[in-house]
Image: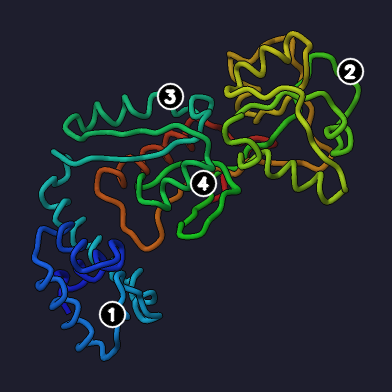
Amino acid sequence: MTITQLTAFLAALDDGSFTAAAKTLGMTQASVSELVARLERELGVALFARGSRRLVPTSAALELRPHAAQAVSAVQNGIDTIQALASLDRGTCTFGVLRNAAYYALADLAETFHHRHPNVRLRLVGINSAHVARSIAAGELEAGLLVLPVDEYGLEVRPLFRDEVLYASATRSPEAGPVTTEEFADAKLVLYDAFAGWDDPTRRQLLERARLRGLTIEPAVEVEHVETALSLVAAGTADTIVSRSIAESEAFPSGIRTFPFAEPMHDTIALVQREGVLLSPATQKLAELAERMLRERLPEHEGRTALS
């Protein structure tokens, strides 16, 4: 079994035909077909059902896929590592961060990494965690820091930090106490991450709590950015939710009070990568830097806890 055979197998699996795989790999169709046939002879099983216009993978092919991907990835990363050495003289890093990364002490992540590794091309994507997770699963991003829960199929997830979610209001009495799910469902709300909607991880938690009690949550206003939502809250238009890190930031409006939920709720920040695929040297370095910066700059206290 060779890396070339595994590469041909993965290309045929992804592209659906030997012809398309050959185009992807810059080889002839006959060469790709022969490489896969040799692999099948060595394994003693058929990897594809032939005869139709599109290759149909067998159950053996689906079982082999994650192992083949990891083997090919490991070899390529080894080559990249030797070429770049410790200084990372080349390569591209693709990494996703949660939308409100600036509140988690990650605002200067790109600057710090670029200063240390100026010859590495950096693509840092900051969108809602639900979309970051999908991009990682699809191979568009190598890894990312995001908020759970997300759909974890095809992903490796390592939780790092928990941050308490608080209710934010300029009109609620300071003596009112913790917020119940019933009160939240009945409140006039402005919620952010409008594009992600109820795919947003924090919203998903709230929606699940409401459903368990037979309640619905219908925000009066939806906006894209937390800063816009907080402006509306400060004006007394509606209430919202924020993480403790946002509530304790210097930019948080002074006229807004925060309250815990009666049943405490947390955002869990996790490092996520595609299942069975090793990170490139550049992305591995960036992931390590992001985790270290997060741990160093977010002190632990009640409502915020490191998980590993």
Could you give the CA–CA distance between mark 1 and mark 3, rounded to whole angstroms? 51 Å
Helix, strand or loop at disc 1? loop
Instruction: Tell me the quarter of the picture where residue 234 sits.
Output: top right
Q: Mark 3 points at which residue?
A: 107
Instruction: Tell me the quarter of the picture where residue 39 sits.
Output: bottom left
Q: What residue type is labelled 4?
A: Ala
Q: Nearest to the eye among marks 1 and 4: give it.
A: 1
Q: Where is residue 137 in the image (x, y as percent from the top left)?
A: 43, 53
34 left or right of 280 in image: left
**For the point 21% across and 61% down, which residue is it?**
20
Query: Is 72 placed above or below 283 here?
Result: below
User: Which comes before the other along the chain, label 3 or label 4?
Assistant: 3
Q: Mark 4 points at which residue?
A: 270
Helix, strand or loop at disc 4? strand
Circles 1 and 4: CB atoms closer than 8 Å:
no
**For the point 37% across and 63% down, which residue is it?**
276
Q: Name the residue under label 2.
A: 173
- Coloured how? rainbow
Q: Position of residue 22 (x, y in %)?
A: 15, 63
Query: Is 155 placed above or below 63 here?
Result: above
Could you give the CA–CA distance between mark 1 and mark 4, rounded to whole angstroms? 42 Å
Could you give the CA–CA distance between mark 2 and mark 4, rounded to whole angstroms? 34 Å
Q: How crowded is mark 3: few (under 14 residues within 10 Å), some or many (20 or more)?
A: few
Q: Position of residue 143 (x, y in %)?
A: 39, 46
Q: Residues within 10 Å of mark 4 (few under 14, many from 20)?
A: many
Helix, strand or loop at disc 3? loop
Q: Name the residue under label 1.
A: 50
Q: Quick one: 232 or 179, which is closer to the camera? A: 232
Q: Which amino acid does label 1 sit on?
A: Arg
Could you give the CA–CA distance between mark 3 and mark 4, rounded to whole angstroms? 17 Å
User: Which comes before the other along the chain, label 1 or label 3?
Assistant: 1
